[in-house]
Amino acid sequence: MTTKRTAGQSITPSVSVTGPSPVGSPTTRLPKCPTGIGGLDEILDGGIPRGRSTLVCGAAGCGKTVLAVEFLVRGILTFDEPGVFVAFEESEADIAANFAGFGVNLADLQQANRLRIDHIEVDRSLIDATGAYDLEGLFIRLKSAIDAVGAKRVAIDTIEVLFAGLGNPQLVRSELHRLFAWLKAQGITSIVTAERGTTTLTRHGIEEFVADCVILLDHEVRDVYATRRLRVIKYRGSPHGVDPYPFLIDSAGISVLPITSVKLDYEASSERVGSGIERLDTLLGGGVFRDSSVLLSGSPGGGKTSLAATFAVAACKRGERALFLAFEEASSQIVRNMRSIGIDLDPWLRAGSLSIVSTRPSAWGLETHLLRIQRQLDQFKPDLVVLDP
């Protein structure tokens, strides 16, 4: 149980993440474009490189398209930066339908002239028949879409479809370099997605060498639990987190949990908060320290949950908010059991100052539990948190 208020980020479109202290002076630091995605900007030391191209690669279903679209949506809603989404596989209607489940109405953003979705069909047979390949047509369409909304951000999904008809690696690299150089000349910050190859980061094994920043997404199963992981493979001109970081995709979008970036540089409070039990507070010298973690240990039936519930009620009586995370009992069972010993949780639940969230431990792996706990902290913003047991 902890009395620490977690000032975590909201996963709503108002997110803005501040990364670690930059290396070097502000005049020499690489300009950054914040993605607005919870936790990702912290790993990237403030965001992806502004005015450059970032490659997001991974296997099918790992979240590449979700990240690309969320980058555009958060750019519009949080940073007032219009965007263009270029799709080579899915139609505009399919993309809009897919992201309706995330609470995002892409049609509204298009009607407001803040987003442009351009679905381009690449006919490989025409390339084979003519033997010619040139990106000028793509540049013209991109330029028109960028100018139409005044775009600052562009997402291209997925790049290997564009070069599916090319068997010459040198030509692929040349055209990729042309594409990234063209986007940079327009002052556009871009995310380009690519499918992962068998032994390389991408199908062609070339894209990662051309991009300024490379992010690898992975979706793996360990000990029967599925875990999504994100790793920054490369970032020219900038420090960045290098570990594989777990991330979550749910109805609110993407959230990254940079566990290893947590520092031991916080301020320790000297304020005492009461437990709700007068004699225990006297024994503790006036209560427990705010921002501290308290371990209640004992055998089954020893009163751990009862004491934790007393702490939660005491916090609510102080006008604070308490989040009770239960891993063995349903919320109604906890309320019933506590009522039997004179602890009434109902008034605080109705008032909205107490929230009980029950989850089976076996529902997910540890990292997913941590991400979901972080999501609860972001949304409820409690002063006291109980984890039982």
Image (cartoon, rainbow, N blue to C red):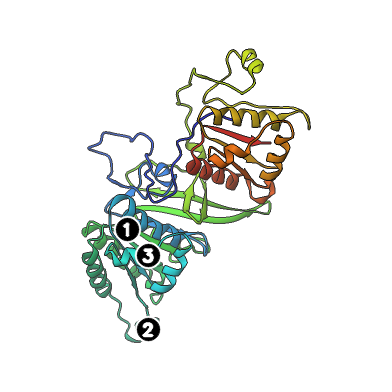
Task: Indicate which disc, 3 or 1, sits on the residue closer to the N terminus.
Answer: 3
- Residue at x 30% of width, y 50% of height: 79
Which mark is first along the chain, 1 or 2?
2
The residue positioned 47% from the left and 67% from the top of the image is 98
In three-dimensional space, the C-alpha distance between marks 2 and 1, rounded to whole angstroms, equals 29 Å
Locate the N terminus by quadrant. Answer: top right
Residue that badge 2 annotates = 128
The answer to whether residue 324 is seen in the rendering is no
User: Tag 1: residue type?
Assistant: Ser
Can you identify the residue that label 1 sits on? 190
Q: Which mark is residue 289?
A: none
Residue that label 3 marks: 106
Answer above or below: position of 227 versus 202.
above
Question: Residue 182's quadrant in the figure?
Answer: bottom left
Q: Is residue 98 left or right of residue 227?
A: left
Q: Secondary structure at mark 3?
A: helix
Q: Looking at the image, tell me whether mark 2 or mark 3 is earlier in sequence order.
A: 3
Separation of marks 2 and 3 at Cα, in angstroms: 35 Å
Q: Position of residue 117 (x, y in %)?
A: 33, 69
Q: Name the kind of residue labelled 2 in the image.
A: Asp
Quadrant of the rendering where the C terminus is positioned: top right
